Amino acid sequence: MPATRVAVPMLDLAAQYAPIRDEIRAVVEEVFDSCRFIGGPHVEGLESELSTFVGAGHGIGVSSGTDALLVAFMALGIGPGDEVVTTPYTFFATGGCIARLGATPVFVDIDPVTFNIDPEAVKAALTPNTKAIVPVHLFGQCADMTAINAIAAEAGLPVVEDAAQAIGARDAGGGKAGSLGPIACFSFYPSKNLGAAGDGGMITCADADLAHTMAIMRNHGMEPAYHHEIIGGNFRLDALQAAVLRIKLKQLDGWAGARRKNAADYRELFAAKGLAEADGAPGGPVTLPAERAGVHHIYNQFVVRIGDGKRDAVRELLRGNNIGCDVYYPKPLHLQPCFASLGYSAGSMPVSEQAALETIALPIFSELTAEQKEAVVDTVAEALVG
Ligand SMILES: *Cc1c(COP(=O)(O)O)cnc(C)c1O
């Protein structure tokens, strides 16, 4: 009988909170004492600090990553009759926000190595009705923005980066996610690398006029008070969330460094067992994440590929050992029932569909211990080779 292994949560927010507990509690008290709950210095402070962090001109705090996408698409005037090209291998919000505005999400397949949108497939999908291109920097690695921006420039189309999973990531050219296109969207959902105490999001934007439009749009399109030239909504970021996020932003690079160290440790452990190539090349029963040359991956998720129909057995044994894991994403968006009317069939996006069957995310949070990483790898090994 194998020895009992240490439990490993998928994410340990309590461990992240402990060292910043006093600082967070103090700022929460400060916000309550000020009673400025909407807008104010913490929202403005975070907008400026985060846009500086990513190297974008402007930051617009919003209520979630989903609302960041929605406001960006609204500001671009996306609506009925328009097509928006994006990936089906992403969280629902990317496609959902396009459809909510009455536009048509046009899904194109992904690269099998990085799981990010395939630029050649983007190019092939453009039509006179295309209104924008939306790459997702999946799992913390930037999509190939050099190629995507070249295609967008040639077609005269805006790119909206879905950077929800990629705060602090850098593309091969050295630019950070959020500064690689005209508009980018971030999420502060608690499981993201920069997580709020609830929901929150941020749009970054290079153009001052567009930033201004989006800033108005998140507050009912109102400017000045009770005057509305455009229709917006309530997509505001809470002052309390902004105050908490400003404290966490100071830790972000350190946390990302710890995630990268965990990834490097996993590579060594998997390679030492002969289960995988350390650099993510295919070979063993496990294919580790591969970093595109020159990128800085921030590992919001550490997603491995397990072929030969063995992924689900690995998942079951991990769960049985109280080791967290998750499948991102088990059903690509083009096969979701709510998008049936778009007419995609099974087999139309083979790379995404195969990834949905073969990938599994392992715990990668910053505070993971050496013993926990060993337990993860030992359990995967047990599932694959006994
Ligand atoms: C998390 C996420 C979103 C949505 O962000 P929320 O803050 O949860 O609304 C959008 N796109 C991607 C790729 C995400 O991972």
Image: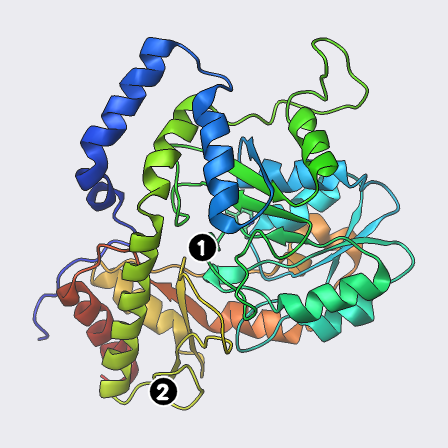
| Res 42 quadrant in image | top left
Q: Is residue 50 visible?
A: yes
Residue pointed to by mark 2: 277
- Residue name at image x 79 percent, y 59 percent: 343
| Res 283 quadrant in image | bottom left
Q: Position of residue 308 (x, y in %)?
A: 44, 84
Q: Is residue 279 left or right of residue 51?
A: left
Pick out the residue farthest to the right. Answer: 128
Type of residue at label 1? Gly
Q: Is residue 368 left or right of residue 124?
A: left
Q: Which numbered disc covers residue 296? A: none
- Residue name at image x 50 percent, y 62 percent: 170
Check the image and report above or below for 85 versus 101. below
Q: Is residue 34 left or right of residue 182?
A: left
Q: Residues within 10 Å of mark 1 (few under 14, many from 20)?
A: many
Q: Position of residue 259 (x, y in %)?
A: 31, 61
Q: Position of residue 142 (x, y in %)?
A: 54, 64
Residue pointed to by mark 1: 168
Tell which circle, 2 or 1, labels the residue nearer the N-terminal end.
1
Q: Position of residue 187 (x, y in %)?
A: 50, 43
Nearer to us of marks 2 and 1 is 1
Q: Is mark 2 within 8 Å of ligand 1?
A: no
Type of residue at label 2? Glu
- Residue name at image x 45 percent, y 40 percent: 188
Mark 2 lies on a secondary structure that is: loop
Front position in the image: 298 or 353: 298
Gap between marks 2 and 1 measured at Cα: 26 Å
Quadrant where the N terminus sits is: bottom left
Front position in the image: 309 or 69: 69
- Residue name at image x 65 percent, y 75 percent: 350
